Amino acid sequence: MNGISIKFSACGIASSALLLAVNAAAASAKVALIHSNPGLGEVTANVAALDALVEEAFQNGADIVVTPELATTGFSITREEAVDSLGFTSPYPELDNVRDLAMAYHGYVAVGIAEVTPSEGVYNTMVLFGPDGLIETQQKRGLSGWHDAGDIPFDVITTPYGDLGMLICSDSYLPDWTRIIALEGADIVLVPANWWGRDGQEEIWQTRARENGLWFLAANRWGTEVDERFGAPFTYYMNDAPSAAISPDGDIQLIYRTEDDPLSPGDTILYQTVVVPDERIGNASNPAYSLSHREPSAYGAIANPYYRRDLGYEPAPGLPTAGPVRVASMAYEPALFPAHNITTINQLWSTRSQDADVLVLPGLGVSVLPVSSSSSGWHSAFPWSALQGFVEQNGLSLLVTTAIEYEHQATLRESLVLVRPGMPPSLHAQIHDTPFLANGSGAEPVLLDLPNARVGVLTGQDALFPETGTHLAKAGADLVLITSTSGSRAPNDPLSSIGYHWDVDALRRMWKTRTNEVVHLAASDWTGNGILVANGGGYISNMEDVGAGGRLKIMSLDTSTVRQKFLNSYYPFDLAALLDD
């Protein structure tokens, strides 16, 4: 083996605002990520290699060890091979040495295997051993062609180092399973992976870590592997597969790809110190904003029958005819004076090279002065009358921004402002509570139909809750618009410590990740940054950053590419975890 050890001390999380915001008393664990190269079908050799790597990790002081997905078999296996020779059955005697090492060193080891149950169910499984032997298994939900979809609930294991959850590889692609684990109280998520390429895996993991306020620890693999399952042999190149350790604020503490190693490739053990506040261990306490302020009443579409793999991907009913829609994101930092903002909007619009149907402005992009929703004529006064005129004059179907809405008893809250031709602007209250304004509405996200597009609209804070994106996708949204005040505008922003404000890079990653649910997206934030993302049917086909300094970009988006969605199917216990108060 290579013997390379990459070590990061506890001071590596000194910038983690989420952890600094809580009690200083904390548990520390040294986590080992095994970055190995399992030989295809070579179970005996793979297990022997794992025995040696796990023992080395424990000898070097590891408390928790994570191996790659399918670390005992390699990736390109068949169901028949799993049943005949490659699959393990509980209590997994082939892993007795790994179990004994966990017991001897009073540590924890997660091993990725192919599993065959006594009833001949075949699963892509993660086995967890601890100081008392076999503890838990978790099965992959996403299908890889050869195994069944996992059918057991996601569980969390309390340890002296924090509460452990487990996910397998691409089960982190959509937010649901990570979210359930976080709701169950996980502090640390262990992720055996077999996910090669440079397609932004770590950006997804960073978003999952930050939106859930937990450590994300992924052990990947390296090497090449010849897949002969589909006729002509195809060689997978896996040296670009990342292993990573990501802190609860979404910062990469450690990332490793074999092809970036200046030395000869080889099995590598990566070490990361993980710190979890004592007050979080053994319970579901979590300071992350998008966990502590959830509104399950707003996510009801998650339970509908549409786009489910097991029900034939039936689409949401009544969708508009698919076709092109021209969407614009306008990025600028709103000024205090409404007249200045109206001038900025007109000036930026004059730079366009084509017209648009939909325009997203930053949150509070017109005025910070409160709007009295009890006054029926609020929209007839400047600057809202000017904004209505802008929409009418330029042939827009929809313009969105936010305003501070004043209600009875002097309550203030941020609300969406939707401006459409031929009708007065409308106010829609933010869904979730805020740290300093009034309570959120708890209502479902705004959803409306335009020619060629079903459109969902979110405030920046509401978009921090991944459930809102899932709800909109399940309701048939083709396009999600985010008008945002969720970017950090000041150094050492205290609201960043609870995840209410995100830095610009984290926001961009989150916006991109929201399109995984097969939607197009346009966003603009009050920091003067925005994005346009076209989804080609499960992947990003085009993306434009709308950078700082005041800019406008327009993209023509074809809604036919997002009508086939690939979303998770849920068991009743999943829905109970996601939707029960």
Image (spheres, grey):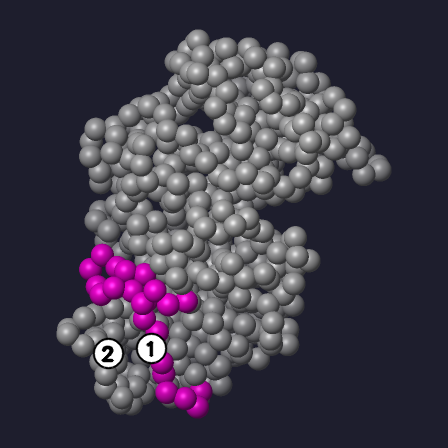
Which residue is rendered at x = 38% and y = 71% of the image?
361
Q: Quadrant of residue 345?
A: bottom left
Where residue 198 sits in the image (x, y, percent)? 57, 40
Left or right of residue 390: residue 516: right
SS at mark 2? strand
Q: Residue furthest left?
A: 409
Q: Nearer the viewer, residue 486 or 21?
A: 21
- In the rendered structure, are the residues bearing label 2 and label 1 in contact, judged by CB atoms less than 8 Å apart? yes
Report which residue position mark 1 lands on.
427
Report which residue position mark 2 lands on.
371
Q: Is residue 422 visible?
A: yes
Q: Measured along the vertical axis of the image, is residue 575 above or below residue 441?
A: above
Where residue 10 sits in the image (x, y, percent)? 30, 26
Q: Measured along the vertical axis of the image, is residue 19 above or below residue 346?
A: above
* Quadrant position of the N terminus in the picture: top right
Which residue is rendered at x = 53% and y = 66% of the image?
475
Where residue 176 sits in the image (x, y, percent)? 49, 48
- Could you classify mark 1 by the number of other residues whose Cα lies within 10 Å: few (under 14), some (14-19), or many (20 or more)? some
Where residue 532 sits in the image (x, y, percent)? 50, 62
Which residue is rendered at x = 62% and y = 33% of the image?
124
Q: Residue furthest front?
A: 119
Q: Nearer the viewer, residue 188 or 160?
A: 160
SS at mark 1? strand
Q: CA distance from mark 2 to mark 1?
A: 9 Å
Q: Measured along the vertical axis of the image, is residue 141 above or below residue 485?
A: above
| Residue type at tag 2 | Val
